[in-house]
Amino acid sequence: MKKLNVHEAKTHLSAVLAEVEEGESFLICRSGRPIADLIPHQKRDRLAPHPIMRRITLQYDPIEPMTADEWPEEG
């Protein structure tokens, strides 16, 4: 991962983006402190479940109809 300061990143943005397209990653710093990572875009698979959503489990059948006792009372 290459390091750039903010001024270099702004001045050479087109060239930096061309390198990112080729797979290079950059760490953008301000006053020597890391501010942002500039990495190649990773296309996500829309059908792959989100890692947190994968941990959710249901303790019931969501398509099973409700019984008469489960319906809210009219009031």
Image: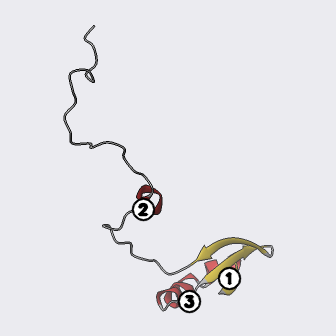
Q: Position of residue 45 (x, y in %)?
A: 34, 72
Question: Which quadrant would residue 10 be assigned to in this image?
Answer: bottom right
Residues under labels 3 and 1: Cα distance? 16 Å
Foreground pick, 55 / 67: 67
Question: Which quadrant would residue 46 be assigned to in this image?
Answer: bottom left
Point 46% across, 77% down: residue: 41
Foreground pick, 15 / 37: 37
> Which element is circle 2 on?
loop
How many numbered circles are shown?
3
Q: Nearer the viewer, mark 2 or mark 3?
A: 2
The numbered dot on residue 24 is 3
Residue type highlighted by circle 1 = Glu
With respect to residue 75, does 18 lie above or below?
A: below
Q: Position of residue 50 (x, y in %)?
A: 42, 62
Q: Which residue is mark 2?
A: 50
Point 26% across, 20% down: residue: 69
> Which element is circle 1 on?
helix
Q: Which residue is mark 1?
A: 8
| Image position of 21 (left or right of 75) | right
